[in-house]
């Protein structure tokens, strides 16, 4: 069975001190959860301090973005090796906010994904359709494009250590989550795309998270779906209590209903 993974995307929030306070209270609330991978993604400036606050904890560290070059004249960028150096195991790539506000393209997403793998950072590749695309029946085509372009050149050996996050743009920060059925439908599509490219066996090893208005009260129903292997959480991860409640809901679902 795939190990569930929940990631708290803190987005553009928290000074170093605020980040440390948040992660310390989260750490105490989830101390007993061993069967769910719990990850937080602070801003770059807080990564080092949060890494120290997480020493020996059951919480891992992610960055919110990465550049594909190792070093050189690329003012303002951060390389995969630097993220490994500060203690990251994961990196979020191609979030819809980066695509929307910073013009990030599928090609750039793909370069970042390949660079992350080169440095043994696990990429969390975000894919998802806009409301207009859903309403004009373009969801499947958009998802296939995002997935195929995002993983181009990723080998069958690397794909099991790749996470895909389905985040419908219309569900992000809106309080309107995809229904469990809507999420399952797209997750199954993503898995079938992976199966076509690699193999059914390889596809079953890849974790696919759902993101978009995940809250303590809807997490269990989403996680129950057979192809939903975790959650990428924004707003509800900015408070230790609500993120811990989501982690607990995932843990309870896996230890009871989802086998
Ligand atoms: P919300 O949980 O605030 O909808 O954000 C989702 C998200 O963008 C996570 O990356």
Image (cartoon, grey):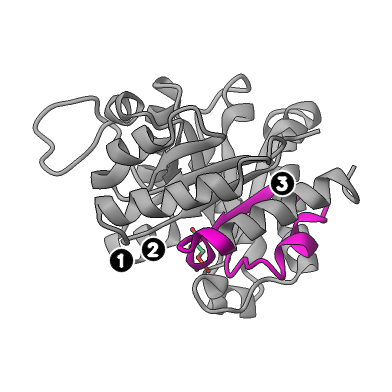
The answer to whether the beta carbon of the residue marked 2 is less than 8 Å from any atom of ligand 1 is yes
Q: Residue placed at 77% from the left, 58% from the top?
A: 184
Q: Nearer the viewer, residue 98 or 225?
A: 225
Mark 1 and mark 2: span between their CA atoms? Answer: 6 Å
Q: Nearer the viewer, mark 3 or mark 2?
A: 3
For label 1, the residue is 101
Determine whether, in the image, residue 165 is placed left or right of residue 197.
Answer: left
Q: Residue placed at 43% from the left, 29% from the top?
A: 55
Q: What element does badge 3 sit on? A: loop
For label 2, the residue is 97
Q: Earlier in the sequence, mark 3 or mark 1?
A: 1
The answer to whether the beta carbon of the residue marked 1 is less than 8 Å from any atom of ligand 1 is no
For label 3, the residue is 229
Q: Residue placed at 81% from the left, 33% from the top?
A: 1
Mark 2 Cα shell of 10 Å, populated few (<14), some (14-19), many (≥20) = few
Is residue 104 in view? Answer: no
Q: Earlier in the sequence, mark 3 or mark 2?
A: 2
Mark 3 Cα shell of 10 Å, populated few (<14), some (14-19), many (≥20) = many
Q: Residue placed at 42% from the left, 54% from the top?
A: 22
Q: What element does badge 1 sit on? A: helix
Q: Which residues are magenta?
A: 212-241
Q: Which mark is residue 77?
A: none
């Amino acid at each position: 069975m795939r190990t569930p993974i929940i990631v708290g995307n803190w987005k553009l929030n928290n000074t170093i001190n605020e980040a440390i306070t948040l992660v310390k209270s989260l750490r105490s609330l989830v101390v007993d959860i061993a069967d769910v991978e719990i990850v937080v993604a602070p801003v770059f400036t807080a990564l080092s301090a949060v890494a120290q606050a997480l020493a020996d904890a059951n919480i891992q560290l992610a960055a919110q973005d990465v550049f594909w070059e190792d070093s050189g004249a690329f003012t303002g960028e951060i390389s995969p090796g630097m993220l490994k150096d500060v203690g990251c195991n994961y990196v979020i790539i191609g979030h819809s906010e980066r695509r929307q506000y910073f013009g990030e393209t599928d090609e750039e997403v793909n370069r970042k994904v390949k660079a992350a793998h080169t440095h043994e950072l696990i990429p969390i590749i975000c894919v998802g359709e806009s409301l207009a695309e859903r309403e004009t029946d373009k969801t499947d085509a958009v998802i296939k494009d995002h997935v195929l372009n995002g993983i181009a050149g990723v080998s069958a050996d690397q794909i099991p250590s790749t996470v895909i996050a389905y985040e419908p743009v219309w569900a992000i920060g809106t309080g309107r989550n995809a229904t469990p059925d809507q999420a399952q439908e797209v997750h199954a599509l993503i898995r079938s795309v992976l199966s076509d490219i690699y193999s059914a066996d390889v596809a079953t090893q890849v974790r696919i998270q759902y993101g978009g208005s995940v809250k303590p009260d809807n997490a269990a129903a989403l996680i129950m779906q057979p192809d939903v292997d975790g959650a990428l959480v924004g707003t509800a991860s900015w408070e230790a209590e609500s993120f811990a409640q989501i982690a607990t809901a995932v843990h309870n679902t896996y230890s009871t209903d989802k086998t």
